[in-house]
Amino acid sequence: MDVMPQADGHTLVIPKAPAESILDVPPAALAATILTTQRVAKAVKKAFAAPGILVAQLNGSPAGQSVFHLHFHVVPRHTGLDLRFHARDMADHKLLAEHAACVRAALD
């Protein structure tokens, strides 16, 4: 879970292969990561009854990257609910644990 979520259920997918950005990761590791991102996105959509899913991946400071290892953001989206600011406010760890349990339960 993202510790500074933009929405409830904001989940991160991080590859096992170390890489700073999408430009640095070996292709096989990227393929495995995007397949996992798809699986996690389906679970987040189900767990949070989200009609939409935002998947984001930032490369370099000018693009908004603030943590310099490759990761994908999976954010459930609902009409009429604005995103919170990225990397601003820490979430309650108990709530994040509850959200993580919901996502795990929704994984096939």
Image (cartoon, grey):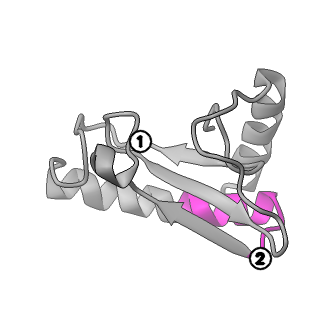
Q: Position of residue 100 (x, y in %)?
A: 72, 39
SS state under label 1: loop
Q: Position of residue 77 (x, y in %)?
A: 73, 67
Q: Which residues are magenta?
A: 39-51
Q: Residue at x 31, y 43 (%)?
A: 61
The N terminus lies in quadrant? top right
Q: Label 1, on which residue? A: 14
Q: Residue at x 71, y 49 (%)?
A: 84
- For badge 2, the amino acid type reads Pro
Please tell me which residue lies in front, 15 or 56: 56
Q: Residue most toward the front? A: 62
| Image disc number at residue 68 | none
Please tell me which residue lies in front, 72 or 34: 72
In the displayed structure, 16 sits above or below 42; it is: above
Asked whether residue 108 is in view, the answer is no
18 lies left or right of 77 = left
| Image disc number at residue 51 | 2
Q: Is residue 42 magenta?
A: yes
The C terminus lies in quadrant? bottom right
Pointer 2 or 1: first along the chain:
1
Number of marks: 2
Q: Position of residue 40 (x, y in %)?
A: 58, 56
Please tell me which residue lies in front, 1 or 103: 1
Asked whether residue 20 is in view, the answer is yes
SS state under label 2: loop
14 lies left or right of 59 = right
In the displayed structure, 80 sits above or below 37; it is: below
Q: Is residue 95 magenta?
A: no
